Amino acid sequence: MSQVIVEADGGSRGNPGPAGYGAVVFAADHVRVLAERKEYIGVATNNVAEYRGLIAGLAASAELGARDVTVRMDSKLVVEQMSGRWKIKHASMIPLAEQARALVAGFDRVSFTWIPRAENSHADRLANEAMDDGELTATVREAVAAGHAAGDEVAVPKSVDANKVSPGWTGAVGKPTRLLLLRHGQTALSVQRRYSGRGNPPLTELGREQVDRAAKMLAAKGDIAAVVSSPLQRARSTAEAAASALGVPLRILDDLTETDFGDWEGLTFAEAAERDPLLHRDWLGDPSIPAPGGESFDQVRERVEGVRRDLVALYPGQNVVVVSHVTPIKTLLQLALGVGPSLLYRLHLDLASLSVAEFYPDGGASVRLVNDTSYL
């Protein structure tokens, strides 16, 4: 499919407020729908949601193998900024525009056209459907953050339409790829509660004990096809113990590495807030804002989503241990739940804890376990 048309939109009920985006990819005839994307993204501005819609539409086009893309949006700001006629002044827009431009660079040709809202009704409908899900996803996030569980399923209040949450109630087709998400063991930086991203501290003595216990627990489970890991030593040491106990191969995946915290690496929460008070405050509420000299949670999500797709394709219907860090594991849980970015700030994961997410071949997903430490 060499030529496609992308229509994208985003909205916020409050500006900032509960926000969502929608994107649709048409064939060149502007009739046949090739792909749809929508997502509730938590509290954000209209412009952030519109950019997220554009990014989703471009990403879907790339997945379809498109080479020539016509983008049609009713956001004058996004169209003019992406066309290079308007400067980007707001700090939160810069990383989003950079992400969109990186996607644009992968095509042979991309054009941007402004259209009236009435001509963007398909994407607008998807964005509103995503925002309508806001109340649902907020309820699910609160249930997860509070640690409510029923058996090995994440508990969902009875007032919630569970059909929209987990394929356990939707009759998802096929056997899922089950990801056993294991956080690495303790390091000196984790003891001191410091930002530990791309640094490479070794495991402490307690960390090595945690790893051994986790490995024995996984070996007792059995029926695991492989172990994949972040390249950072704290995760790799954890993964090597698990792979050895299971007798299965270990693969290192660079995209499972922790967030690059840039200039905040090694600082405590309080020290980072004191160093960059305004930026740190905004960073806590907006996943598109990167740490100084580092990366944003949106960038982490993009690479982790690629890992998820690859693992589902490589290990269909199998169990895989994924050894990583707080942000990538939370992101995989976020993708499985289909919820907004506030889960990143509300969900707690202990060192060497186990969570379990399942991804079905038909696109469904479920979370079966969060933050288990019973074996430690």
Image (tube, helix red, strand yellow):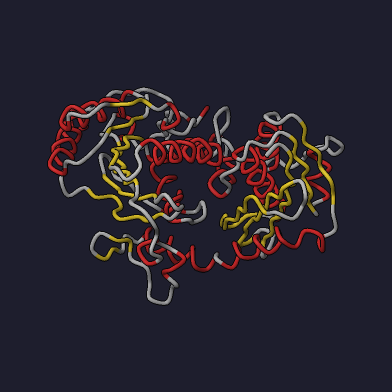
Please tell me which residue is depicted at 65% across the width and 61% down the height of the picture: 126
**Tally of numbered discs:** 0
Task: Give the left or right position of residue 323, taking residue 121 as reference.
Answer: left
Classify the position of the C terminus by image quarter. Answer: top left
Query: Which corner quadrant of the image does residue 279 belong to?
Result: top right
Residue at the outermost right position: 85
Please tell me which residue is depicted at 79% across the width and 49% down the height of the picture: 72
Give how far across and how far down residue 143 sits, in percent: 38, 64
Tell me: residue 110, above or below residue 231.
Answer: below
Give how far across and how far down residue 156 sits, in percent: 37, 68
Tell me: residue 272, above or below residue 34.
Answer: above
Query: Which corner quadrant of the image does residue 98 belong to?
Result: top right
Please tell me which residue is depicted at 39% across the width and 57% down the height of the picture: 173
Give how far across and how far down residue 184 sits, in percent: 29, 34
Task: Give the left or right position of residue 183, taking residue 262 as reference.
Answer: left
Front position in the image: 17 or 193: 17
Residue at the outermost bottom position: 159
Query: Which corner quadrant of the image does residue 171 belong to?
Result: bottom left
Classify the position of the N terminus by image quarter. Answer: top right
Please tell me which residue is depicted at 42% across the width and 49% down the height of the picture: 361
Front position in the image: 207 or 170: 170
